[in-house]
Image (cartoon, helix red, strand yellow):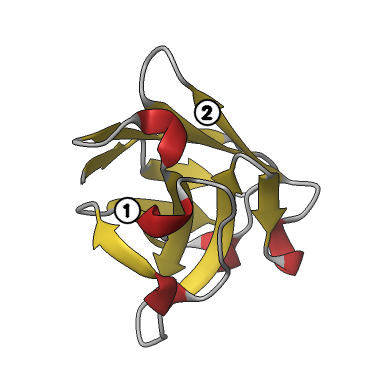
Amino acid sequence: VQLQASGGGLVQAGDSLRLACVVSGRTFSSVSVGWLRQAPGKEREFVSCISRSGGKYEDSVKGRFTISRDNAKNTVYLQMNSLKPEDTAVYYCAAGGLVYEGLWCSEAPDWYSFWGQGTLVTVSS
């Protein structure tokens, strides 16, 4: 499975960004995809994931971020609204749990076996 993330950039607090993750190498509907982020000096943390069972969100992004998938484009999106300086990080998309054929997804970073290259999101105050 290969993943290509894009859409990061420099924005001001309160602005919006949409990240995209193109997935290849596997039937898209059978893949669960997560977004995780790593801020400078911090460990990688879960942000959101999507599976055939729906989406999950980390508490600090609930109500601000929305994850979605376009099966026709093999792409998972992360719409990020009301961005805050603490959202500044490198955002990675990742795929995991292939044996479950996309039925569910996990909040645990080590559940994900395949990773994209990351895209930097910087939110200025």
Name the residue: 56% across, 52% down.
Answer: 49
Q: Is residue 106 above or below residue 9?
A: below
SS class of the residue under badge 1? strand
Q: Which residue is mark 1?
A: 120
68 or 9, nearer to the observer: 68
x and y percentages locating residue 77 in the rendered image: 49, 33
For residue 120, say whether it is visible: yes
Between the residue at mark 1 and the residue at mark 2, the CA separation in whole angstroms equals 21 Å
Residue 91 at what x, y percent from top left?
38, 56
Q: Is the residue under label 2 in contact with that under label 1 (CB below 8 Å)?
A: no
Residue 66 is situated, as x and y percent measured from the top left of the image, at 66, 39
Type of amino acid at the residue the image marks with label 2? Arg
* Of the image marks 1 and 2, the number of the one nearer the N terminus: 2
Which numbered circle lies on residue 69? 2
SS type, badge 2: strand
Residue 26 circle label: none
Residue at the image point whose x is 56% and y is 58% from the top: 105
Query: Which amino acid type is marked by label 1?
Result: Leu
Which quadrant is home to the C terminus? bottom right
Q: Along the line of sight, which residue is nearer the eye, 62 or 94? A: 94
